[in-house]
Image: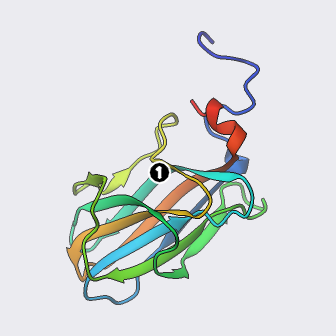
Amino acid sequence: MEYENPTRRYKWFRPRQAQYGSIQPGTHVNYGQGSLYNDSTGPQLLVVRAINMLSSQGANMFLQAYQGKSGAPGGTVSPFVAGEARLAGALFSLDNASGLFAVFGMSSPTGSFPFNGSLPVMVLPPGWSLLAQSSGLADVCTFSFLWEAISIDELDFLY
């Protein structure tokens, strides 16, 4: 194809380097929040490819980067290719009493940032989280993420 470098080690999407997971904040009275945390102990970045929020209120979703963990661990994480080893990435949830200062917001009814194969939602270095929060108080919501774990030297060949 035109405009492609066949020598690149990393192009587009690699299913064997991908995982997906979802988390539902427990019973809460404030703003439900789910987050994806890069728990890598090595030089792995998380390339967040897609995020989705299912909301009982049709609420909006706000995103923000955060250095550190936020909330309690939980949820389920699975490799994109069944039988592959677990990679970096852990899910957390929180009943947050305050709203996020969002760097990116998504309105209902979509509540999702779909996978389009080229532009990621965010790239998380080790020790960073992507926080996703519902705009509805006491909203019963579920947050789902799809991400790839890549080495830092592959980042320049991401696009």
Residue 44 image offset from top left, x and y in percent: 69, 53
Q: Nearer the viewer, residue 131 or 87?
A: 131
Question: Please, what is the three-letter code of the amino acid marked with disc 1?
Answer: Ala
Residue 154 lies in quadrant: top right
Residue 135 image offset from top left, x and y in percent: 22, 69
Q: Secondary structure at mark 1?
A: strand
Q: Is the residue 25 above or below the residue 108 in the image? A: below
Residue 31 image offset from top left, x and y in percent: 27, 78
| Residue corresponding to mark 1 | 50
Q: Residues within 10 Å of mark 1 (few under 14, many from 20)?
A: many
- Residue drawn at point x = 71 percent, y = 38 percent: 153
Residue 95 lies in quadrant: bottom left
Residue 13 image offset from top left, x and y in percent: 62, 39
- Residue drawn at point x = 60 percent, y = 9 percent: 2
Say which quadrant the N terminus sits in: top right
Q: Is residue 2 left or right of residue 111?
A: right
Q: Residue furthest top?
A: 2
Q: Is the residue 20 above or below the residue 48 in the image? A: below
